Image (cartoon, helix red, strand yellow):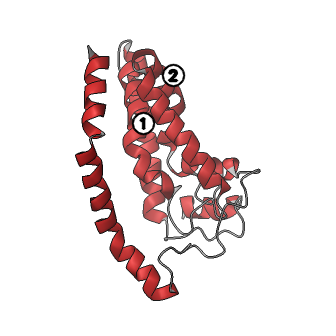
Amino acid sequence: MKAEQGRRQLRGIFQVRVVGLLLVAGVVLWLPQLAYYHYLHGSWLTYSYGQEGFPNLLTPKLAELWAAPKNGSFLYNPVLLLLLPGTLVLFRTAPRQAALAFGTWAVASYLYAAWWDYALGCGYAGRGFVELYVLLAWPIAALMAYLLAPPRWVQGAAATFVVLCLAYNMRLSLQFDRCFYGTHAWDWSAYYSLLLN
């Protein structure tokens, strides 16, 4: 029943009229950007990142992206540590959602780690993941629902962990001054001064 309904929805989306309308809307939405490129560079299509690119494709900076004092996503936002076990919990009841959330996070992690600046410039805690939080909430919510079932000591431990993670995250975000001012990615002294200042 659901499979047939899904096929009908897909057929409805791929009608010539719908595809044509989407193409026209896309052109209308992109036209100002293309006109701006043409005005600046004399070309309708321009690579606006200059010399920036993906020099780390074969050696992605995954450890730095996740754990370095220079904006490591898990280090600055430890509630994301619930993503991995949450994916396992979610996989039992909703394998497609688990695969979508984890796959999106894994691909985004690789792309950010392969980019010339894994920290994406000045920003807080792997800011590139912010737009993925909607998807990443699925496994985290599944894990929390699982942990908030009895026994009571598990509920208390889970709630305490989340509250501590959020307090830690708030402390860092209030102390953070737009950029990490360490001398290199693993400058723990700069991180400790940020945390304890």
Lower sequence index among marks 1 and 2:
2
Q: Report the mark closest to the observer, 1 or 2.
A: 2
Q: How far, Cα to Cα, is label 1 from label 2?
A: 18 Å
Residue 15 image offset from top left, x and y in percent? 26, 40
Q: Which amino acid does label 2 sit on?
A: Leu
Residue 165 image offset from top left, x and y in percent? 46, 42
Q: Residue at x 51, y 34 (%)?
A: 102
Determine which residue is flagged by label 1.
162
Residue 55 seen in the current view: yes
Residue 92 image offset from top left, x and y in percent? 45, 15
Which corner quadrant of the image does residue 134 belong to? top left
Q: Which amino acid does label 1 sit on?
A: Val
SS label for mark 1? helix
Determine which residue is flagged by label 2.
88
Mark 2, other Cα within 10 Å: few <14 / some 14–19 / many ≥20: some
Which corner quadrant of the image does residue 2 belong to? top left
Residue 47 image offset from top left, x and y in percent? 56, 72
The answer to whether residue 192 is above or below residue 167 is below
| Drawn side of residue 127 relative to residue 192, left or right | left
SS label for mark 2? helix
Screen quadrant of the C terminus: bottom right
| Residue at the far front in the pictured view | 16
Screen quadrant of the N terminus: top left
Residue sitting nearer the eye, 119 or 154: 119
